[in-house]
Amino acid sequence: MQGKIGFVGMGSMAQAILKGWKSTALFAEDQFAAYAPNQEKLRKNAKEIGFEPYSDLPSLMRDCNTLIVACKPDQVERALGGVKEQLAGKTLISIAALWTFERYAELLGDGVRVQFVMPNTPAMAKAGMFLFEDNNSLLPEELDAVKQWFSSIGEVEVIPTKLMGIASCIAGSAPAFVDMMMEGLSDAAVSCGMPRDMSYRLIAQMVVGSGRLLQESGEHPGALKDAVCSPGGSTILGVEALDKAGFRAACQEAVHATMKRT
């Protein structure tokens, strides 16, 4: 896919994705552009990250063959609804939560080729999880190219439309739950005398390593937990404490609470 790629919105997630892409060899240096209502912030980000800032959305749409919809979900209809004629024949990649292929079809008709992708914040570290809705209207070669773009800064998983809600919760919202867990572990480490920065290093690597072990071993998480728990050892006492505190039930409740908004 050739031509300029335009971002509609330049918030934290768009910045993370763009910074990741610019660190790869997949794109030309001058291939990116963006529009956002806050022009002062847009120009500041353009200077820091390296993209062409646009002062109006119609001009961005005119000059870009591919558009990344990265504005807030409640802004999508207002941003695109009045310019849908200009989108005819364009490729639209949306990272706006809850905006599925069906919703775009209702808003824009069938003249725009659309793919909904749900990212997550680890994209900032080129370790993102990108959920591709299986229902899309991209050409085969476009879909291959877009998957390659996102694979360059993380993992890509194709998800049935009916599972996009729960998948977005696990991949998109649950990093906040893990962050809270890491914060709690760090507080405990500090209370036991460990410097804060040291606790962060140990905890971060522990989470990365545990995730990688789950990926590569194919073992059930319970089996991996059992492997750490020696009979009469200290780890099983910690596991018992977590169970008494309702740790697993709290994780389940967090997911169900998040799903109420999807």
Image (cartoon, rainbow, N blue to C red):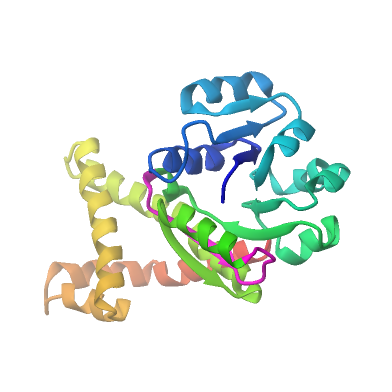
Instruction: Specify the segment rendered in magenta.
Output: 125-139
Q: Position of residue 73 (x, y in %)?
A: 71, 49
Please give the name of the residue rendered at 19% of the width and 36% of the height, measured from the top-left corner: 195
Please give the name of the residue rendered at 80% of the width and 62% of the height, measured from the top-left corner: 105
150 relative to 212, above or below: above
Please state if 2 lies on the left or on the right of 113 as rendered.
left
Q: Is residue 19 in view?
A: yes
Q: In which image quadrant can residue 116 be found?
A: bottom right
Please state if 11 lies on the left or on the right of 26 as rendered.
right
Q: Position of residue 135 (x, y in %)?
A: 66, 71
Q: Position of residue 237 (x, y in %)?
A: 21, 70
Q: In which image quadrant can residue 132 be found?
A: bottom right
Q: Is residue 177 in view?
A: no
Please state if 238 lies on the left or on the right of 98 as rendered.
left
Please give the name of the residue rendered at 29% of the width and 51% of the height, measured from the top-left corner: 185
**Depth order, front residue of 195/22:** 22
Q: Is residue 146 magenta?
A: no
Position of the C terminus, as image quadrant, is bottom right
Q: Is residue 138 magenta?
A: yes
Q: In which image quadrant can residue 36 be found?
A: top right
**Number of numbered discs overlaid on the protein picture:** 0
Please give the name of the residue rendered at 28% of the width and 46% of the height, measured from the top-left corner: 186
Q: Residue furthest front?
A: 2
